[in-house]
Image (cartoon, helix red, strand yellow):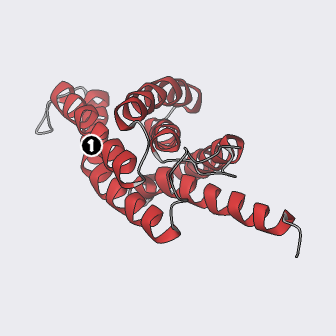
């Protein structure tokens, strides 16, 4: 469980979901660029698609903007450190999960969710374990969708990472309220 830094009021659900919405909107162009670059690299023919290296590089360069929005809009006490940790987690989680899942989309959801969990401020009662479980659930859901719904998963998939973290925080808050003594 985490505690809110001294002097900070708990973030209202409205502000948290506004941050998640803006972060997701900033994530979508990065998502599509990464995906276009990965598809072009896998195609290998170079016929009419984007330059794979440029698309992947630009997609990776845009991801920190989503994390910056999440960190500042959720009033993270040290936003630059949170963004750097989020980027590191994105790569440290996303690359191995992509390799294990044998698809890039599952790894992107897992990596971006792990980064989002770091960028979104955790208030008192928010559990890192619940956040990690929510991101893992989103990645498993994506893994199943990739194998059953094929290309259709690409439409809603950018919404999964940060939404999973927001839902995890709601579950943590609900559990805390449920376990609180009635006065």
Q: Residue at x 50, y 38 (%)?
A: 118
Q: In this view, does 146 lie to the left or right of 23?
A: right
- Report helix, strand or loop for mark 1: helix
Q: Nearer the viewer, residue 8 or 172?
A: 8
Q: Specify the quadrant that holds the C terminus.
A: bottom right
Q: Position of residue 129 (x, y in %)?
A: 71, 41
Q: Count of labels shown?
A: 1
Q: Where is residue 44 in the image (x, y as percent from the top left)?
A: 24, 26
**For the residue carrying disc 1, how many other residues have a C-alpha within 10 Å: few (<14), some (14-19), or many (20+)?**
some
Q: Which of 175 and 107 is in front in this view?
A: 175
Q: Is residue 47 left or right of residue 30?
A: left
* Extreme residue in the bottom direction: 183
Q: Residue at x 41, y 36 (%)?
A: 78
Q: Position of residue 87 (x, y in %)?
A: 39, 30
Q: Does residue 84 lie above or below 33 as drawn?
A: above
Q: Is residue 181 left or right of residue 74?
A: right
Q: In this view, does 180 lie to the left or right of 105?
A: right
The residue that disc 1 covers is 65
Q: Which of 60 and 106 is in front in this view?
A: 60
Q: Where is residue 131 in the image (x, y as percent from the top left)?
A: 63, 46
Q: Nearer the viewer, residue 41 or 183?
A: 183
Q: Residue at x 44, y 33 (%)?
A: 86
Q: Specify the quadrant that holds the N terminus.
A: top right
Q: Which residue is drawn at 43% across and 44% down?
A: 76
Question: In which image quadrant can residue 80 be found?
Answer: top left
Q: Does residue 3 lie above or below 40 as drawn?
A: below
């Amino acid at each position: 469980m985490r505690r809110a830094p001294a002097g900070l009021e708990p973030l209202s659900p409205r502000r948290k979901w506004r941050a998640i919405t803006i972060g997701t909107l900033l994530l979508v162009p990065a998502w599509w660029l990464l995906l276009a670059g990965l598809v072009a690299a896998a195609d290998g023919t170079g016929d009419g698609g984007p330059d794979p290296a440029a698309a992947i590089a630009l997609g990776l360069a845009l991801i920190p903007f989503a994390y910056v929005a999440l960190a500042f809009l959720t009033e993270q006490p040290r936003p630059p450190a949170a963004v750097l940790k989020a980027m590191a987690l994105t790569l440290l989680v996303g690359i191995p999960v992509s390799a294990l899942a044998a698809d890039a989309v599952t790894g992107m959801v897992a990596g971006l969710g792990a980064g989002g969990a770091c960028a979104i401020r955790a208030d008192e009662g928010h559990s890192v374990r619940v956040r990690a479980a929510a991101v893992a659930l989103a990645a498993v859901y994506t893994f199943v969708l990739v194998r059953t719904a094929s290309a259709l998963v690409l439409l809603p998939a950018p919404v999964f990472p940060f939404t999973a973290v927001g839902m995890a925080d709601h579950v943590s808050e609900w559990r805390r309220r449920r376990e609180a003594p009635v006065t």
